[in-house]
């Protein structure tokens, strides 16, 4: 799924214009980035968590020449899927059902509800 497809899905599901849906998606992404830049973690129950991991400086090797190269320390974003997301993805009988009004819902054999985001 691309960002444009995400915007289109949000516009349809929330009955918004594509322009409003695009701004909404941008606000969510900006909020995630800003929170991670402040060193905080983001936990979305039932979906997963975003964190920043610190990678230390290390010595690497240039694959073309074989010469040693210094690789500086850096911060790397990391996503860890939640238990419910893993279960929903791995359920063999789980399907994404679209109702006549265009709303999407997750249909499965058990009575669990999909996470509300």
Image: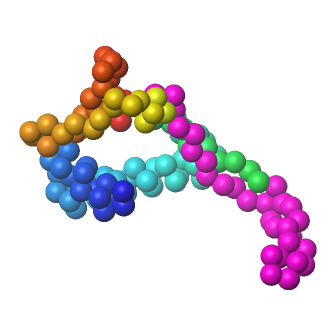
80 or 73: which is nearer to us?
80
Q: Position of residue 116 (x, y in %)?
A: 33, 31
- Left or right, 5 with respect to 87, comes to left
- Left or right, 28 with respect to 20, comes to right
Q: Looking at the image, can residue 19 be seen?
A: yes
Q: Where is residue 112 in the image (x, y as percent from the top left)?
A: 34, 20
Q: Where is residue 60 in the image (x, y as percent from the top left)?
A: 85, 67
105 or 77: which is nearer to us?
105
Magenta part of the chain: 56-85
Looking at the rendered image, the quarter that the C terminus falls into is: top left
Residue found at the far bottom of this picture = 65
Q: Does the magenta stretch include residue 7?
A: no
Residue found at the far left of this picture = 100
The residue drawn where x is 22% and y is 37% is 97
- Left or right, 62 with respect to 111, comes to right
The residue drawn where x is 16% and y is 57% is 17
- Res. 114 image quadrant: top left
Above or below: residue 87 compared with residue 53: above
The residue drawn where x is 73% and y is 59% is 74
Count of residue discs: 0
Above or below: residue 47 compared with residue 13: above
The residue drawn where x is 31% and y is 16% is 111
Above or below: residue 67 compared with residue 56: below
């Amino acid at each position: 799924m691309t960002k444009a497809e995400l915007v289109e899905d949000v516009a349809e599901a929330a009955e918004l214009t594509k322009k409003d849906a695009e701004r909404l998606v941008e606000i969510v992404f900006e909020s995630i980035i800003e929170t991670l830049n402040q060193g905080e973690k983001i936990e979305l129950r039932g979906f997963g968590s975003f964190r920043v991991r610190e990678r230390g400086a290390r010595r690497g090797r240039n694959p073309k020449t074989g010469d040693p190269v210094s690789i500086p320390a850096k911060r790397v974003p990391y996503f860890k899927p939640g238990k419910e997301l893993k279960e929903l993805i791995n359920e063999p009988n789980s399907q994404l059902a679209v109702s006549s009004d265009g709303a999407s819902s997750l249909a499965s054999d058990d009575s669990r509800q999909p996470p509300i985001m």
